[in-house]
Image (spheres, rainbow, N blue to C red):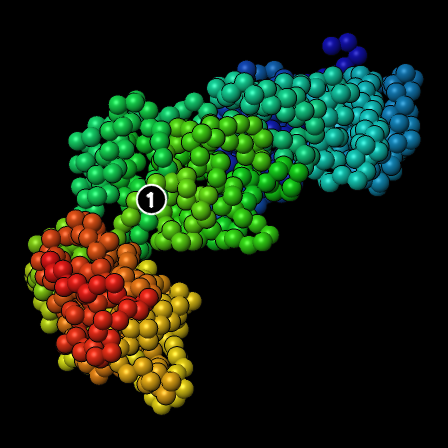
Amino acid sequence: MPGILFSRSTVLPMLPMREEVIFPMMTVPFFIGRKPSMEALDKALATDRQIFVITQTNSTTEDPQQEDLFTVGTIGKILQIMRLPNGTVKALFEAKQRARVIRTEWDMGMYVAQVEPVLDEYPISQECQDWADKVRHLLAKHADELKHRIPEKKLETVQNLDAVQLSDYLAPLLELTRQQKQQLLETLPPQERLQLIHYILQEELEVRQLEDRLKKQVQNQVASSQKEDYLQEQLRSIQKELGQIDESRTELDELTQKVKEAKMTTEAEDVALKELKKLKLMSPMSSEANVVRNYIEWLVSMPWQKSSDDNFDLEHAQKILDEDHYGLEKVKERIVEYIAVAHLKGALKGPILCLVGPPGVGKTSLAKSIARSLNRNFVRMSLGGVRDEAEIRGHRRTYIGALPGKIIQSIRKAKSKNPVLLMDEVDKLYQSTMSDPSAALLEVLDPEQNNTFMDHYLEVEYDLSDVLFLCTANSTQDIPAPLLDRMEVIQLSGYTELEKYQIATRFLVPKQCTEHGLEAKQLKFQTKAITEIISRYTREAGVRSLEREVGKVCRKIVTQLVRSKASKNMVVTPKMIHKLLGVPPFQHDTKEDENRVGTAVGLGVTQLGGELLMVEAGLMHGSGALSLTGKLGDVMQESAQAAFSYVRANAAYLGIDAGVFDKTDLHIHLPEGAIPKDGPSAGLALITSIVSSFTKIPIRHDVAMTGEITLRGHVTEIGGLKAKLLAAKRGFIEEVIIPQDNEKDLSEIPEEIKKELKIHIVTSVDEALHLNLERFPKPFATAVGTFNSMQPEMVAQPNIS
């Protein structure tokens, strides 16, 4: 190489470096772990401490050969070493001069190299001095800009170095790649090294100046933006300067592809593409871009064309319904009819079904069974406590944190356009003068309108006509009339004790045994044990509490088995029930022990099922006032007033002295005064207790009655007949009086109830009084042959079925 002097070659221990490039004048620590390198280090320490350090071309090579090494390295001296506990050695190396590799070889477990040291002792040309001055001038001029790279003290040292040393001193201080550092090391003429250093410094300063200029531009554009916006704008400005802006970024490409694959409606796809164009022009990290991105994600995630294949096989549907639920024959029959129509039409479109009944009778699980029988996805949407119309139809995107409404969220969750969507507790919607969320459901539940449902967030039409909507409620009274008009109500009344027993035996006991780790043979319940739980530990129309009590028994049995470390089989008896569950918390109302004056047994219905309703009437001296207590509602109070008016109008016929009313106060009370009571069906019991009080004729304690009365003495239709008859049977009542208008409902009453109760059908108060009093009052002689507008038009014999 012309102009470069080499000294005589010499053989030295060689230390290959994976990454580090060592320049002359450097004192640097490094760690040595490879065994050949440690042997070379020991060899150097045993002689004059000189060693040759060279960098590998590939840092991952474990046993480098000569072709795996660069051609120029550094000769230096090991100043000190420290042997570490993990077996590695930390060495402090002082580099002296460059050296060129002639050849390398393996000798006694280490690398050795024959090298030619480079001599820097020759005259420096004026041109070389000029380049050194240029470098020093550049450093001095831009000291402030380079201080983050080169400390101030080192900049002062630079001014005192000669032209040969200058480049080697600066090279380690600059942020260079390994290739750039090796290029500087292999550049032997000092003048060329200085030119290369000058070029690198100038490039560094240009980048720094560009950064400052871009920073000012970005600060002007996003002065009021968040930090994320600033960083993104800076990145975009850099890309503009470099000409590397790529408008078709990966994320946008993915969104565009999703829009094409989503099979949206034409309207929705146009909106999505329009929003995509807006998104491309926005800063990806801006808040508005996040809103647009979320909106497009919602559009593409909706199941526009995805649907499950319907199964309209009636036998399959009947089998699943029977597997999942015992009883409920009328309900199952209606559901099978619904599926049969769908099978014939080839599409499941029709009225919205609303399952109405007390808690725990299986409304929600029945909806799941319908979905399973149809092979459709099931999704549940709870409406209890929903107070804002926007929760149904979504919020507009102008609001921060806006989302679609529950309908669209549920469809997305179902992942198909034709799921079974259960709207649970539709009667618990919150209504006020400020908002009425039920109004938002009118369009959803109307088969003629819901094919163009528009959510406020999506703002494009979505077809809900393929969705099978099912609703549940505990009572229809709290469902707004326009909403109720769009639904077909299917009543689920409470279970009889026999039905509860069958449900417990077939479903609840096996389920709880499995959940508690018991095999079927390990735990069995006697029939009387289950009956005891049903009658004395639960008070409900459904079976939720029954399942909890069965689960409690299983837990206590499991605890006993674990403590005793035994695996014997257990049979639960009624005595064990009392021991495991404690004192029975419930004692259902039962009939009186004897006939009493003024005490009649009525029948009422609550959300928990039917109940016996005791009606008491008492007389005292006064001025003819009527007192009503027991937390009675307006309808029941009016019913009591109508009953009293009937008795006063027909006093002579009923054997009552008309003069007694002006001197006597009547007090009517219904026990359990903390519980609100309302409705007209207690009218017959009210009139019976009033007549008994004034005539002193006892009322039969084994007869219960229900029926609304009129001022003319007619007994009219009531509701909840099955629940009331269940309550009568549970209270050991032997005979029940019902209105003739309810005779048609007896066909739906289980035979087990009708066999144990003697049911009387009446049309008038007169007929009822002949049945529920020990004897009918003897009319006064003045009543014979007379006619009162409120007197019964005729006296008929009771109709006994």
* 682 relative to 740, above or below: below
Q: Where does the C terminus fall, quadrant-wise?
A: bottom left
Q: Is residue 354 left or right of residue 751?
A: right
453 and 549: which is toward the camera: 453
Residue most toward the bottom? 621
138 and 762: which is toward the camera: 762
The residue depicted at 80 percent of the width and 16 percent of the height is 192
The residue depicted at 44 percent of the width and 47 percent of the height is 481
The residue depicted at 47 percent of the width and 31 percent of the height is 450
343 and 252: which is toward the camera: 343
Image quadrant where residue 755 sits = bottom left
Residue 397: percent from left, percent from top: 63, 37
What crowding class fits label 1: few (fewer than 14 Cα within 10 Å), some (14-19), or many (20 or more)?
some
515 and 177: which is toward the camera: 515
Residue most toward the top? 2
Image quadrant where residue 596 sits = bottom left
Q: Where does the N terminus fall, quadrant-wise?
A: top right
The residue depicted at 75 percent of the width and 25 percent of the height is 238
Question: Please, what secondary structure does the residue beneath circle 1 have?
Answer: strand
Mark 1 belongs to which amino acid?
A: Val
Residue 344: percent from left, percent from top: 26, 23
* 632 relative to 174, above or below: below
Q: Is residue 511 visible?
A: no
* 30 relative to 518, above or below: above
